[in-house]
Structure formats: C-alpha cells, structure tokens
Amino acid sequence: MAKDTPLLVTTTPSVEGRRIVEYKGLVGGDAILGANMFRDMFAGLRDLVGGRAGSYEKVLRGAKTQALEDMIESARERGANAIVGVDLDYETVQVQDGGAMLMVSVSGTAVVLE
C-alpha cells in the first residue's frame, strides 16, 4: 500500500458496513520524549496558579502523533488497509537525575477490509 494512501484507524473492534477479510496481526508504536527543566519549572508554577500547561500539551500531542505514525507504518508494511481496536496509553517514566520522560504507547490490530 502506498504511503500516501489513507489507512483507517479506529478504536472500535470493527468498521460498520465493512467486513474484515484478513487479520495481519498486532501492530504498535511508542514514543518516549523528555521534557526539559524549564518546562518542568513553568508547569509547576502553572499548577500553583491554575491554567493549562501548553508546553506539556504540545509535547504530548507530538508523542501521540509519533506513536500513531509508527503503528500505521508497521500496518502498511504488513499490507493492511486499516487498524482496529486501537488503544493509547500514557505514562511518565522517572529517570535517575530526578527528571521525567513521557511515554506514549499505541497498539491495535492490522486488518484488511473488504
């Protein structure tokens, strides 16, 4: 399948009106991104006064996009035209220097739809 051909990605186990004709297996993607100390400091201040932590939101969106792109690429390599049952997980990972990294994992089942 060409890289520019859209690939359907859904959290549902099936696609209404379309029949799954072949299962290509579990596919996934991961992204681990570090947040720098200035963002950490300003996010802490924002927590004290309230409001949204825009820098963290941007990092989170980027990690989610990267993980999804990795999963989609894996499905394309297997010849799938859709991924069903997609699940996104978010975790923070503490590192030795006291900082934290953001981990986003995504998985689903690569399929061929009729």
Image (cartoon, rainbow, N blue to C red):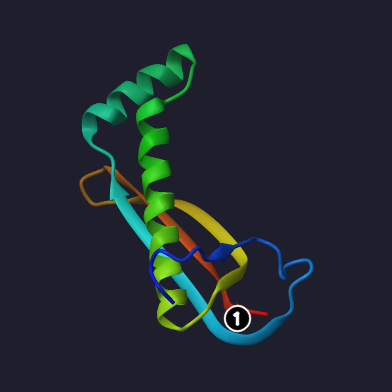
At 63% across and 61% down in the image, what residue appears?
10
Q: Which of 108 and 50 is in front in this view?
A: 108
Farthest residue in the right direction?
17
- Residue of label 1: 112
- Classed neighbour count for the residue bearing mark 1: other residues with Cα under 10 Å, few (<14), some (14–19), many (≥20): some
Q: Is residue 92 among the parts visible in the rendering?
A: no
The number of discs equals 1
Image coords of residue 109 (percent x, y) = 58, 76
The quadrant in which the N terminus is found is bottom left
Quadrant in the picture for residue 32: bottom left
From where the camera sits, is residue 33 visible? yes
Image spot of residue 110 (x, y percent): 55, 77
Q: Is residue 66 found left or right of 86 in the rendered image?
A: left
Q: Which of 45 and 75 is in front in this view?
A: 75
Point 37% across, 45% down: residue:
62
Q: What element carries label 1?
A: strand
Q: State left or right for residue 90 relative to residue 10.
A: left
Residue 84 on image: x %, y %: 63, 69
Out of 100 and 60, give the one closest to the viewer. Answer: 60
